[in-house]
Every structure is written in C-alpha cells, then in structure tokens.
Image (tube, rainbow, N blue to C red):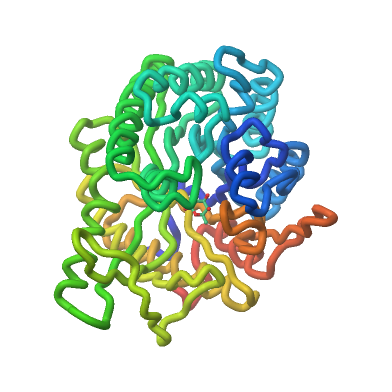
Amino acid sequence: MAKKFPSSFLWGAAISSYQTEGGNSNSDWAVFEADRGLETANRACDHYFRFEKDFLLAKKLDLNSLRISIEWARVFPSFNKVDEREIAHYLKVVDSLSELGLEPFITLHHFTNPIWFSQNGGWLKSKNIDCFLKFVSRMASDLKSKVRYWMIFNEPMVYLFKGYLEGAWPPGEKSLTKSLRVVKNMLSAYKTAYQEIKNVYDQQQSYVSITKHMLYFQGCERGHLWLNRFSAFLRGKLFNDSILDYLASKKIIDFIGLNYYRKEYSEFVPLLGRECGHQNHCQRRNSLNWYVYPEGLGFFLDRLKKYGLPIFITENGTAENEEEYYQPFLMDHLKEVKNAIDRGVDVRGYFYWSLLDNFEWDKGFNQRFGLYSVNYDTLERNPRQFSSVYGKIAKDNMLPDGDC
Ligand code: FCB
C-alpha cells in the first residue's frame, strides 16, 4: 500500500464563528446563555480581531485548508438590514485564508441564528426560510470567486436534537411535533439554498453539502441485550443515515462532510432508546465523558462509500484533561482514515476539531479541543505537543513510519 495520502489531500482544522470570534451579541445563543445562567461566550478567543494571526498558526503547521463559519447575525443584524462592514470583514477573512494557501471551507449555519430570526419563530415557521436564503444568496454571490466548498448546515440532527427535543440548546424546546416541523423547514431551506448556490456559481465549480455528525451506536451491555442492540440499530438509522439518504436520493449533495467523535451505548426504552446510564469502565473516555472509538471512523467511512461521493472528514478531535491523550487519539483516527483510503474509500481531506481551544456551547470554556491552547485571560495561543505531530503528517502527507 502507498505510504502517502493522495497528493491533493486536504489537511485542515475547523473552527466556528460563535465559538471563537467573540462579540456575537446579536446571536440567539447569547440570549440563551443569559436566560439559562450558562457560561457566556463573550469575547471567546477574540478571533474576530485576531483571525490573521490565527490563520498563520494553521499555516505554521503546514495545513492547506481551514473550515470556518460565517455568523449570520453579524451579516444580518436585523430582519432587512445587511451590515456591509461585516460582509467586508468576511471577504477579508477569506482573502487572508487564500493568501496563505488555505483552502476555505465555509459553513453558513453552525448552530446559531440572529436574535430577530428566533424571535420570529425561527425554523418553526416556513415563512422564515426566505430570511436564511437571503443570507445564503448574498454570501454566495460575494464569495463565489474565492470559495468552492460550502456547508449549508452544520450537523442538522444535533441542532434538532439539542434544541428541539432535549431542550439543552436554543430555543430550549422539548417537542416532537415541533422537531418534525423544524426538520421539514430546514430540509426545504437546504434544497433551495443548494439550488441558489448552484445558480449563483453558474458554470463555476462549487461543492455544496452539510456536515453530518455520526455517532457509533452500540447496544448497552446491561439489561435486555437484544433490545439494546435493536435500539442502537434504530437510532443509527434515524440519527446517522436518514438525512444523507434523503439528500443523496434527491441528488442535492456534492460531497459528504463527516463529523466523527465517539461511540455511544444505547439502551432500549420505547420507542427508540436512549444513552445507556451504565458506564463501561474498560473503555477510555475523554474529558466530556465521550467514549473514544477510532474504529468507528473506519466503519463510517466504509458505510459512506455507497453514496459514491467524495468524503471530507470535516470534524474529528478530542478534549482531554491530560496532554498525553491527544496524540494517540489523532494517530489512531488517522490510521483509520488511511486504511479506508487503501480500501478504496474516496476520502479527500481531514479537518481536526479544532485549531484553537474555544467555547464548547453549554459546556463552556473548560473543554479544550485545540491544536493550540488558549489562555482566556491573556488570549495567548500556545501549540499543544501533538500539534507538531499533526503538522509533520500534513507536511509529509503521510503517517510516520511504523504507523501505517
Ligand atoms: C461538534 C460541533 C462543534 C464542536 C464539536 C466538539 O458537534 O459541530 O461545534 O462543538 O462538536
């Protein structure tokens, strides 16, 4: 087997606007944090003012791509008003990526909405879809000469589950009927947004998709084993497969953006199942208590082959309390990627989550995912040890000897 990754392989890292930029007070997450008394994102990593330096940090690691998102609430601070200064800002951001030779991957919706949009009923109202489309259309027109890869939604199932079923994220709803309305509206927004980007690009090449969070569900090893396995199967079908199957059947997806982090044990409760309360002490968990399971990445890459589309791993990473765990996590997952490529899976890139430590939603700043750690008092960035290992892999376009 060739030791090298394919020559055009993209080595990247991912961040999102709300989690890093700071000052996103027009976004619904800011209101939710205040209402729930959660830790607030505030200035986050101050990336809004430090983006050039942060991109240099990616360049220092010999990365050749970066996944970022554009904060809708900055561009449209109110219903009918575009803030041209923010558009100019994001043009500068993308130019700065290109100048450094970092291929921009742009996400248009990474969990956050403008406050006015949420106050008008958000994704529950089909009439609101047009507001999102205006944003999509404006960004695509302004960036079409600079950007090829677009992700319209980040992890729609996670957004739905957390925001409309579990109620732990904005808008804090716990309703199956509302969830169904939201899925319908988001899918319809996606379809039109996909078409809109294609129209704007006309003959120019664009690749449009979502990022799909995949969870490796396994039956809980306590209780009714067969029922638990059945619930793992059902939850996998619903959470992992349903949206991709739909988009692929309509031929409105140009690549697969795979976000993979972990395994979850599932226990049967009518109708579907839930995360198993019993903890498996033989398996390693990270600082978020997530089970680390690199084999799951290989498993999903094989499964995704059926769509016949290029695959980018748009997020994969870990948060740890001890430094020693980052490197094995990275290496074990990259081995899975390389082995999948050797088995004929068309994987075209890998984006480590995240370039920097950042604001991990309802978990706040304690969960540290960064290739660079951030000191939130001084905002100083420092490379974690494993970042140089990742940098060497990106530079050589291969895993170190003995790791293939
Ligand atoms: C993903 C999210 C990303 C980050 C990582 C840890 O599900 O897309 O914003 O929170 O998890």
Front one among 369 and 206 = 369
Residue drawn 19% across the image and 62% down it? 270
As displayed, is residue 147 above or below residue 170? above
As displayed, is residue 111 above or below residue 77? below
Location of the C terminus by quadrant is bottom left
Residue drawn 64% across the image and 24% down it? 91
Residue drawn 63% across the image and 22% down it? 77
Front one among 156 and 303 = 156
Residue 74 located left or right of residue 111: right
Farthest residue, direction bottom: 282
Instruction: Tell me if residue 64 can be seen.
Output: yes
Location of the N terminus by quadrant is bottom left
Residue drawn 61% across the image and 44% down it? 35
Farthest residue, direction top: 80
Spot occupied by residue 331 in the image (x, y as percentages of width and height): 50, 70
Spot occupied by residue 120 in the image (x, y as percentages of width and height): 48, 24
Spot occupied by residue 69 in the image (x, y as percentages of width and height): 56, 37
Residue 46 located left or right of residue 204: right
Question: To which quarter of the image does residue 244 belong?
Answer: top left
> How many marks can you see?
0
Front one among 256 and 20 = 20
Instruction: Tell me if residue 17 can be seen.
Output: no
Residue 28 located left or right of residue 45: left
Front one among 339 and 381 = 381
